[in-house]
Amino acid sequence: MTVIALMTDFGLKDPYVGMMKAVILSINPNAVIVDLTHDVPKYNVILASHILKVSYRYFPKGTVFVVVVDPGVGSRRRPIIISSRNYLFVGPDNGVLIPAAKDDGLLNAYEINIKIAGLKEISHTFHGRDIFAPTAAYLSLGMLPDVLGHRLSPDELISTAELPEEPIITAEGI
């Protein structure tokens, strides 16, 4: 039984998180889905990467993390999977996954093949539901990242170091 942890900037008043969970459960009805948070301020990749980095290690080994904090949705940015020593990370290639993956020992990176891993119809603005959720579900069933995409050099990935610096502020003021 694999845990799938979700983090988004969607909030909870709209149906978007529920739709992602529905896609996951339609592919893997036995998935254990944990909500890390859905209250990341809109498009705050820096804060999301920080939350992921300080949280991932408390999850069971083998957890698949899906992070959808994506100011570039609908653009040419790549959907990716990153494997580390103990975890898999799924999301946009915008730097949000890199700090946690490096902290755990980044092993490989893959560009998701949306014809294999995505839903039949892919929206330009809801990659969380149409690409990232099904990819995580397939990974939770034991599919290997090599089957769902093609390998990239980790050096090709966008790093948070390349993103504009923003203050990291949470309710606790961190």
Image (cartoon, helix red, strand yellow):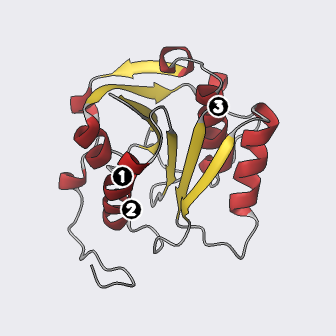
* Marks 2 and 1, how far apart at CA: 6 Å
In the picture, the quarter occupied by the N terminus is top right
- Mark in front: 3 vs 2: 3
Number of residues whose C-alpha sits closer than 10 Å to that of mark 1, classed few (under 14), some (14–19) or many (20 or more): many
Residue wearing tag 2: 48
Residue wearing tag 3: 1
Residue at figure coordinates x 34%, y 67% from the top left: 47
Q: Secondary structure at mark 1?
A: loop
Query: In this picture, is 74 found above or below 134?
Result: below
Query: Residue 154: x percent and y percent?
Result: 26, 29
Is residue 120 in sight in this rendering?
A: no
Q: Secondary structure at mark 2?
A: helix
Does residue 126 appear to the left or right of 157 in the view shown? right
Upstream in the sequence, badge 1 or badge 3?
3
Residues at circles 2 and 1 in contact by the CB criterion of under 8 Å: yes
Number of residues whose C-alpha sits closer than 10 Å to that of mark 2, classed few (under 14), some (14–19) or many (20 or more): many
Number of residues whose C-alpha sits closer than 10 Å to that of mark 3, classed few (under 14), some (14–19) or many (20 or more): few
- Amino acid, disc 1: Val
- Amino acid, disc 3: Met
* Marks 3 and 2, how far apart at CA: 26 Å
Most foreground residue, 101 or 3: 3
- Amino acid, disc 2: Ala
Residue wearing tag 1: 96
Does residue 128 appear to the left or right of 88 in the view shown? right
Does residue 151 appear to the left or right of 67 in the view shown? left
Query: In this picture, is 40 found above or below 102?
Result: below
